[in-house]
Image: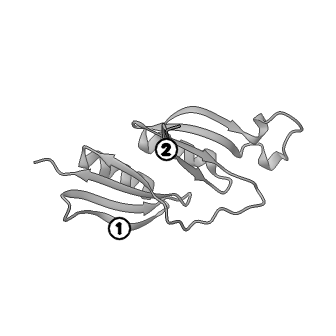
Amino acid sequence: MAITQINAYLNTNGDGLEAVKLYERVLGAKIESLQTFADIPGPPPAPEDKNRVMHAVLHIGPGLVMLSDGPKNRTIPKDSNAHVCLAFDDADDMAKKFEGLAAGGTVTMPLQDTFWGARFGMLVDRHGIHWMFNCHKQG
């Protein structure tokens, strides 16, 4: 059986709804589905857990990203060796989205021209998600 798709699955520390709203606003993400822990059948969660994201599916451009807050008793590390890489065809649009995700986060490599003929930058957003931005130069 062949692999038919690969998706990034992002984990946040209880601020998943805020992350989803940020990605909607800044990246134009479209929510395909979003369930909170309050949506799970069975006994209701503790009041402080009802709005935690159990599972969300977001369309960002042609890609698909999933997201969850994960268990309350497990802290998600903010350091990672994985990045979500966004490819752009418009450097100005990329710069706006880069600044939007950088707000409250950490720029690890400012947007800059590269030797491979692209404008490129990296950041960690305020939810601890690592992003790469790449826009090949026309010409």
Decide: few, some or many residues near mark 1? Use Cα within 10 Å; few <14, some 14-19, many ≥20: few
> With 7 as the anchor, is 71 left or right in this view?
right
Location of residue 53 with respect to 134 vertically, above or below: above
Tell me which label, 1 or 2, sits earlier in the chain.
2
Residue under pointer 2: 6
Q: What distance separates the C-alpha of mark 1 from that of mark 2?
A: 26 Å
Position in image of residue 17 (x %, y %)? 62, 44
Circle 1: residue type: Met
Front-lying residue, 132 or 102: 132
Residue farthest toward the top in the current orientation of the protein: 32
Location of residue 56 with respect to 134 vertically, above or below: above
For mark 2, give the secondary structure.
Answer: loop
Q: Residue at x 19, y 65 (%)?
A: 115
Q: Residue at x 29, y 59 (%)?
A: 120
Q: Residue at x 74, y 61 (%)?
A: 74
Q: Which mark is residue 109?
A: 1
Position in image of residue 80 (x %, y %)? 53, 65
Residue farthest toward the right in the current orientation of the protein: 43
Task: Please name the colour scheme applied to the rendered image.
Answer: one colour
